[in-house]
Image: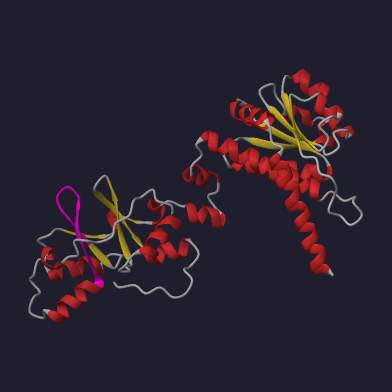
Amino acid sequence: MSIETGRRVLAMESAAITACADQLDDSFDQAVNLIFECVGRVVTCGVGKSGHIAKKMAATLSSTGTPSLFLHAAEAVHGDLGMVTGDDIVLMYSHSGETDEILHLFEPIHLLGAKVILITGNPESTAAKQSAISLNTHVTKEACSHKLAPTTSTTVMLALSDALAICVMDRRGFTPKDFHERHPKGSLGKQLTPVRSLMVPYEEIAVVGPEADVLEVMAAISSAPVGAACIVNEDQHLLGLISDGDLRRYIVNHPDGLHAKAQSFMNTKAYTIEPDLPADQALARFRKMERKAGDFPVVEDGRVIGVLTLKDLLRQVKPLAGREETSG
């Protein structure tokens, strides 16, 4: 019984979102343009369940490049209208468009000089007639078994809000780097952290010239927190890489070759990585490598600036499914 009810609710809400998508018109473009061109902030406003959607929209806008805050409709008339300025856009939420707390706000908001965008299920309502732009989220009925609790209507409001936010975000040319600056912590922040923030800096890694012998390479690796040595020229350009494993294999196969030069047994085809690549993309690149490696020279403008270790990368993002084999 519960499964069937659950399927019914999901089907109803899905159909309502599709219907909302089908009826989008020029008013949606106008709303996107108005928000994009706003020189102040977007103040989202609502009460009850609509208020919860408004609060979520403020968070979504703020995290995608549009400064925003939430104004509770009931608190607004008791002083919180001081949050609003003439440069702002007020994004109001009211399913009926006749909510008293919402209607009481129009006169003072207009006096402040702010413009109102209304998201409502009643485009002919009093609130719609007083708004600069009205977006229609009309639904035929709620998914609630009694057709009372806001369910389908709030789902459509939420979906339309997301559509607005994403369109504005795209207009801004908002990038993953911008997103990370607003999400420095949590799982999203970890995945978007750039390689340069995770790498072992140049000053701390093992670096030798092409003429260094086996013992010098061994000493450099032993004194560094990274299990590989970058072979560079005078301009700090990468010539090759010698991992701890490369070194051990060379010594086993050439026990009398301790005076061999690094350039004679370095890996000249070592994988490198860019410093501004997000951590999740760096991990995706590792997954695609034919020969797994544990250390990646970080190269910027042709120069080595550090080394990213697989160990540090895995600490930052979710571990790979299954056990990864590395050859070091």
In the rendered image, residue 231 lying in the magenta stretch gets the answer: yes
Which of these two is toward me, 199 or 203? 199
Q: Position of residue 94 (x, y in %)?
A: 82, 37
Which of these two is toward me, 193 or 120? 120
* Quarter of the rendering containing residue 285: bottom left
Q: Position of residue 62 (x, y in %)?
A: 61, 40
- Residue with the most extreme right position: 146
Which of these two is toward me, 318 or 203? 318
Q: Position of residue 131 (x, y in %)?
A: 77, 25
* Quarter of the rendering containing residue 76: top right
- Is 83 situated above or below 10? above
**Left-right relation of 53 to 288:** right
Task: Kindly identify the residue that appears in the image at 69 percent across and 45 percent down.
Answer: 159
In the rendered image, residue 28 lying in the magenta stretch gets the answer: no
* Quarter of the rendering containing residue 162: top right
Part of the protein shown in magenta: 230-244
Q: Position of residue 328 (x, y in %)?
A: 29, 72
Task: Kindly identify the residue that appears in the image at 86 percent across and 27 percent down.
Answer: 126
